[in-house]
């Protein structure tokens, strides 16, 4: 029997990409609401309570409301919003860090944010290994394609081709910071500098490290070896060779959907500094691809099914 699946918010960017990845998959019976029903609370409640799994592709407050609408049913949920990422009772849906068995048995799974996916993939294993200090004041420089901001930001960039770069979150307090701190095991939230460029998709997350000033003065070689060991055998996350250091890392406007994650350790020539860099698709491993990966795990299906790697 097919698994009954409902995407609440299927008309948004993340929801549309999830539907693309589900195309042709006979394991699922997709419940679809028409335009009028999507805005009808009763119809949404019926859908939320009638399906085996619901994927929430909604703003935070709407996601919280959807959980209430499903109250009393046995529906399992994957929430792509930031509403439940550090909430008790929800499992953080980063299989490589949290463990697949926890997601397999979870009723409520919260998809990681796109920026935190890159940051945590780089930093969390190294803090766990004792190579990076939990109480260091880390900084994060990151750039994303405009699709990460949803339909409103997409429309803004399309309507105004003169925008070349958008820095935001200048007063701090970005909604991704709590999960970045919690799942990296940090004593302090990092200083986070997010930005957007005029490309539809793609993301680079850059964590600069003054190796000579860090406790224990870890080497780039040790950091790289630890990341390689941590992600050995991963179908999703790759670690580039330590040398040669790439001359450049590009985001392309023509980039196709991609559900992987590439990590780099880039040391300075004298070894006193390094940059940890993650490249991903903000709509892939950063959103819709991660939701499908979690869905596959929750349903006992091959983890990579339907994904572009």
Image: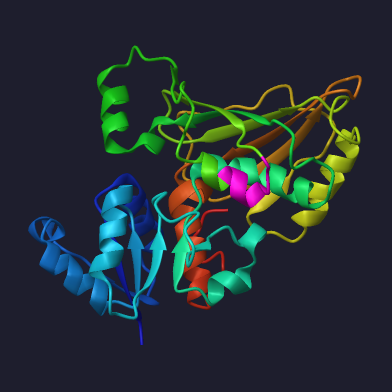
Can residue 258 be seen at all in this image of the molecule?
A: no
Residue at image location 34% in from the left, 11% down from the top: 162
Query: Residue extending furthest left?
Result: 36
As drawn, is 7 to the left or to the right of 280? left
Query: Residue extending furthest bottom?
Result: 1
Q: Quadrant of residue 253?
A: top left
Above or below, comparing residue 68 to residue 126 in the picture:
below
Q: Position of residue 73 (x, y in %)?
A: 29, 80
On the rendered image, what quadrant is the N terminus found in?
bottom left
Q: Quadrant of residue 206?
A: top right
Residue at image location 56% in from the left, 64% down from the top: 304
Dominant secondary-structure state across the stretch colored magenta: helix
As drawn, is 11 to the left or to the right of 1? left
Can residue 123 be seen at all in this image of the molecule?
A: yes
Total label count?
0
Q: Position of residue 270 (x, y in %)?
A: 91, 19
Q: What range of the chain is rendered magenta?
A: 180-187
Q: Is residue 186 magenta?
A: yes
């Amino acid at each position: 029997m097919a698994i009954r699946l409902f995407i609440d918010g299927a008309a948004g960017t993340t929801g549309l990409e999830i539907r693309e990845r589900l195309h042709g998959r006979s394991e699922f019976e997709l419940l679809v609401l028409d335009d009028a029903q999507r805005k009808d609370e009763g119809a949404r409640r019926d859908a939320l309570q009638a399906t085996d799994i619901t994927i929430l592709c909604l703003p935070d407050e709407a996601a919280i409301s959807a959980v209430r609408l499903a109250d009393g049913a046995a529906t399992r949920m994957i929430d792509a919003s930031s509403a439940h990422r550090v909430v008790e009772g929800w499992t953080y849906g980063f299989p490589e860090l949290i463990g697949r068995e926890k997601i397999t048995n979870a009723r409520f799974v919260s998809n990681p944010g796109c920026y935190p996916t890159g940051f945590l993939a780089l930093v969390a294993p190294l803090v766990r290994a004792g190579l990076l200090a939990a109480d260091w004041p880390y900084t994060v420089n990151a750039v994303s394609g405009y699709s990460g901001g949803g339909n409103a930001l997409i429309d803004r960039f399309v309507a105004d081709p003169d925008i070349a770069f958008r820095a935001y979150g200048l007063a701090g307090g970005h909604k991704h910071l709590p999960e970045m701190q919690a799942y990296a095991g940090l004593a302090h939230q990092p200083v986070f500098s997010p930005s957007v460029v005029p490309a539809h998709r793609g993301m680079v997350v850059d964590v600069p490290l003054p190796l000579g000033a860090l406790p224990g003065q870890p080497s780039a070689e040790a950091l790289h070896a630890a990341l390689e060991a941590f992600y050995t055998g991963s179908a999703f996350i790759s670690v580039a060779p330590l040398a040669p250091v790439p001359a450049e890392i590009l985001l392309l406007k023509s980039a196709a959907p991609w559900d992987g994650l590439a990590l780099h350790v880039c040391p300075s020539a004298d070894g006193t500094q390094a940059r940890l860099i993650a490249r991903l698709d903000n709509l892939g491993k950063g959103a819709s691809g991660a939701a499908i990966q979690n869905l596959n795990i929750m349903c006992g299906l091959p983890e990579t099914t339907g994904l572009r790697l």
